[in-house]
Structure formats: C-alpha cells, structure tokens
Amino acid sequence: MKKFEIPTFYKSSFITTIKEARKITDPRKKDFSPTYLDFGNVGFYMARHFGFCYGVENAIEISHKTVEENPGKRIFLLSQMIHNPNVNDNLIKKGITFIQDTYGNQLVDWSEIKKEDIVILPAFGTTLEIEEKLKNIGIQIEQYDTTCPFVKKVWNSSKKLGDSDYSIIIHGKFKHEETRATFSHSGENAASVVILNMDEAEFIGDVILGKRSKEEFYQEFEGKFTAGFDVEKDFVRIGVVNQTTMLASETHAISMYFRKIMVEKYGEEKIKEHFADTRDTLCYATNDNQEATIGLLKADADLALVVGGYNSSNTSHLVELLEDKFKTYYISSADEFTAEGINHFNYRNKEMISTLNFLPKKEKVNIILTSGASCPDALVDEVLDKILAFYNAPKSKEEVLLELEKLTS
C-alpha cells in the first residue's frame, strides 16, 4: 500500500513501533486481538488497528503539498478536511480557508471565489451540485480532489445499481458530508433514499409490504429521498449502500432485513429480480478498526479511552461498541483530563460531560486505548504519556518496547 508523506508532528515513533511489530507477526491482518503494554502499575490494551487510514493520509498529504507548491495563492478547503479538530486547525494555520462548515453552512460566499484560486475537495467528497458550481467559476477541482477512493467506490456501486434499474437505499447520517455527497451521486443514476438505522429500515419495510401508506413514507422521509421518488415503482428493485463509516454489523443487518422483506413479497425464487446482493461498501479501515474494537471486548480492563473528533462518525461507533462492556470516555485529546477528572463527549446527546475520579484507585489499572481513523497517533501517544505520569509508572516506554520486541521476535 502506498506510503504517504504527512507532517512528522502527527506521528509517534512509539506507536509506529507497536504497529510495525504487529505487522510482522500478523502480515495478513487475521489477528484482531489487542496489544498489551505492561508498565507495572498500569497497563494498556492497544487496539490492533487504529489511527489514520489511507484516505486521511492521502488528503493530508495533498493539502500540505498544495500549500507548499503554491506560495502566494489563495487556497480554500470546501469544508473540514476530515473530522478532527487538530488536523483542521493545522490547515487553517497553514493559511487555508474553509468555504463551508461541516453541516454545509456557507462561511465564504461563492462570489468571493475566483478562478485563480485553489479549492481542495475534502476526503468526504462533495455533491454534484457543488462540483458544477466550482467548475462554473473556473476552478480546476480534479487536481486538488482528496475524495477517499473508498467513498468513490460507493459512488461506483451506486451507479452500477442505477444502471441496472435498482433504487438505492443509503445507510448513513443524512447531514454528514459523505452521505450528502453519496446521495447526490446516487441520485444522478437512480431513485435514492437515506436511512439512519434499523428502525427506519423497518418503516420502509412496512411501506414495501403495504402496511404503511406512501403518504406516511413521504412525510417521514421528507428531504431524504430524490425528486420524483415513486413508492409504488421505486421499491420494486432495491440495493443497499452505505456511508463508509457506519457500523458494519448494522449495515449488514439492514441489508439482510431488506432481502427478507423482498423474499416475503416476491418469493425466494424471484429475489435476484428485486434485491441486489451488493458487497459491503464499508471501507477497509473502518472495518479493521471495528473488528479490532470487537477484539478489545475480550480484555480485562477497568475503562476505555477513545480519542477522536467529536463529529467523527467512525469514532463514535468505536465508542458505541466499547460502552456495552466498559466505562468508556470519548475525548479529543489529552487536554480533556487531569488526575482528578475528565471531560468527555456524549455522542448520543451531543454534549460534554464531566466525571470526577475516572481512574480507579487500585494496585494495577488496565486501560483500553484506541482512536478513530481521523486521529493522529501523536494525540494517542500524548494520552498514554499523561496517564503514565499520573501513576509514576515504574517501567519506561523503552523497556516496554523491548519486552514487546522479545515477544514478537
């Protein structure tokens, strides 16, 4: 896989060494068990996979090179490059200006953008409407397009479905940049609708089976289906794609649910005429991170720390998986906690919570530590260092790496 040139301040030599050691012992990525780091009075279960993915590193490399290669030019980013405040703040410090916020609200009027300017498309991609708007201004978007290839893979799957006369059900968060982009691209080729979860899937299942009226569908999903969507003909042949950062298990369950609905209505012998057996469109990094998080559930840990941006979809799903078993704290950086307490994010209610005495007082504490695909390893390392300082850990990081090397040699 391609190696990207990203700024060194995003990296951690300690974490890189751990990841490289796991690659040696598990080159085909079949072992999703965590790496245990024993510092004496405190131990860390590090997820098998976490941190920057291919698409994120690609986007960061292109953005920083664009700044370096175009001194004196005005450089804009269509919206947040990725969902991590540390990365986005660094780009702003580099002189890049955001045109929109993460929800599509305008920060810079389109009239202020000139054809001489550079506009970078974020890793999430963008809508066809915005692409056309930029082209009409005279912006060369192809040269500075950082859209993740796995997002484009979903768009290609959507096109194939549309070309075969299937309607498309998109499993995603409707306001998320990636889902807005996918909805726009899929809508060019096929009738499309966005659903958030199994509850909404079951609502549509009832519509397909005639248990709910088409009027109820139009009201419930207002604004989330393509223009001219016709319930009576557009739910006859369907396929499912997703926002690449959703829970893989949920996307699979939704897909299997719709297959069952179509079997119930049309019969098993005609299922291929009514349901497209699409392969999972989740990106490899999201899938690996989620499988590695499931691997963490077997750990004997006192708590879990998940590091990432608070508007990061893939990070919130790691929290969702861990909180079923562990007291889990979702933080953006080491700045969020002290030895006395921690400020952490409730992704369900979108609010910050303060918790005192989050670190248990016992002879040996074990902590799960992982991060989302848009989180720099350097931030995870800072969290680990801060915890080690609280405990005055008897073993150094160098000693722990030597022990790890003996185990993996």
Image (cartoon, rainbow, N blue to C red):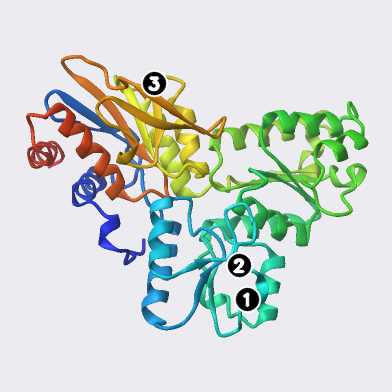
Q: Amino acid at mark 3?
A: Phe
Q: Residues under labels 1 and 2: Cα distance?
A: 7 Å
Identity of the residue drawn at 81% across and 55% down:
165
Percent position (x, y) of residue 19? 25, 46
Q: Amino acid at mark 2?
A: Val
- Crowdedness near tag 2: few (<14), some (14–19) or many (≥20) residues, C-alpha within 10 Å: some
Residue 123, compared with residue 345, is above or below; it is: below
Residue contact between numbered discs 1 and 2, judged by CB atoms under 8 Å: yes
Residue 324 shows which numbered tag?
Answer: none
How many marks the image carries: the answer is 3
Relative to the observer, which residue lies in front, 259 or 84?
84
Q: Residues under labels 3 and 1: Cα distance?
A: 49 Å
Q: Going by the image, does 179 lie left or right of 245?
A: right
Residue 320, compared with residue 360, is above or below; it is: below
Relative to the observer, which residue lies in front, 37 or 23?
37
Residue beneath label 1, please? 112
Residue beneath label 2, please? 108
Label 3 sits on a secondary structure element that is loop
Label 2 sits on a secondary structure element that is loop
- Toward the top, the furthest residue is 362
Percent position (x, y) of residue 358? 32, 22
Nearer the camera: disc 3 or disc 1: 1
In what quadrant of the picture does the N terminus appear? bottom left
Relative to the observer, which residue lies in front, 236 or 303?
303
Percent position (x, y) of residue 35? 25, 34
Residue contact between numbered discs 3 and 1, judged by CB atoms under 8 Å: no
Identity of the residue drawn at 27% across and 49% down:
378
Quarter of the rendering containing residue 160: bottom right
- Crowdedness near tag 1: few (<14), some (14–19) or many (≥20) residues, C-alpha within 10 Å: few
Residue beneath label 3, please? 326
Q: Amino acid at mark 1?
A: Glu
Quarter of the rendering containing residue 304: top left
